[in-house]
Image: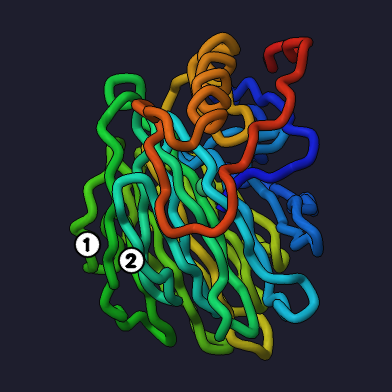
Amino acid sequence: MTNLEAVATEHDCRPTAPPAAAPDGTELLEPRDVPLGGIRAMSVRRTLPQRARSFVGAWCFLDHYGPDDVALTGGMRVPPHPHTGLQTVSWLFSGEIEHRDSLGTHCLVRPGELNLMTAGHGISHSEDSTPTTTVLHGVQLWTVLPERDRDADPAFDHYVPPVTALDGGEARVFLGSLAGSTSPVPTFSPLVGAEVRLRPGAAHTFAVDPAFEHAVLVDAGAVAVDGTPAPVHHLLYRAPGATTLTLTATGDGEVRVLLIGGLPLGERIVMWWNFIGRDHEEVVAARTQWQAEIADVTGPAPRFGRVTGHADAPLPAPVIPGLRLTPRA
Ligand code: MN
């Protein structure tokens, strides 16, 4: 998916100073409703980035959507658009999305299957919910490519993680290692990402890397993270330091969460629209290049390539803000 905000805001993302977290190391991040563009706009709940926090490890963007009746929202219709300096992770709970990219990848994104696209120096892709999709429900995450790898070659990885049994639940580990399950998909910094489901009353304690910061996105159910309640649709952050992380299903219903984590990145980035760079000038240059490459769709497209087989024209970039935001302390 894309960042389709009508007014694209530039985010100057810096490592968060430790005092943002409570004494127990947790920090509750509220979702913000963001209407995406389009004729019948679909809306997402964004928990990263936000004022209080830009990163969880290298995870830097988290949109959670649905369950949406696509007959009402129109589903996902995202024409070809560019990315730089990041990876996109599409993870569905329900529905199906058709992905096409400028590497020639054409595949279906299905529930329980990881589709990870590495933008590196530049890529373009399109995403559309399929005609048979009735309910669309899932997440879109981005990871920052660290300084040494941010101009890496673009790539696409598909992986179907096995279902790993937990105490009273199950996990699907799509990136990194958790609960004895390790994803073979390479990452550019140490990361973990998993869907975790718990039955009512269940609790599971995960062994985790104490150097990682973690966060739990609550999709459904009442859940506590190390005893701290995490409300539905919120992201509960937990600072590094502990060797375990315990999830407890505290209500009558089944719990489904996304557990993400990683080694703190410690790098400053600038995020604007679908680009990540290290300064304002870099995202301006990426925008200029994209606009030039889509001005003549039969001409060369050395940076972002061409998506073939999509009916719609590539998405023009919004106007870039004339004023730079004051960097966040
Ligand atoms: Mn995208």
Quarter occupied by the C terminus = top right
Q: Residue at x 27, y 55 (%)?
A: 157
Depth check: give the residue in front, 95 or 302: 302
Q: Residue at x 51, y 64 (%)?
A: 258
Q: Are marks 2 and 1 in contact (CB under 8 Å)?
A: yes
Residue 164 figure quarter: bottom left
Q: Residue at x 68, y 76 (%)?
A: 67
Depth check: give the residue in front, 34 or 230: 34
Depth check: give the residue in front, 192 or 34: 34
Type of amino acid under label 1: Thr
The correct choice, above or below, for 259 with respect to 268 in the image is below
Q: Position of residue 235 (x, y in %)?
A: 64, 54
Q: Position of residue 169 (x, y in %)?
A: 43, 84
Q: Which mark is residue 173?
A: 2
The correct choice, above or below, for 220 with respect to 101 in the image is below
The correct choice, above or below, for 265 with respect to 170 in the image is above
The correct choice, above or below, for 169 with respect to 121 in the image is below
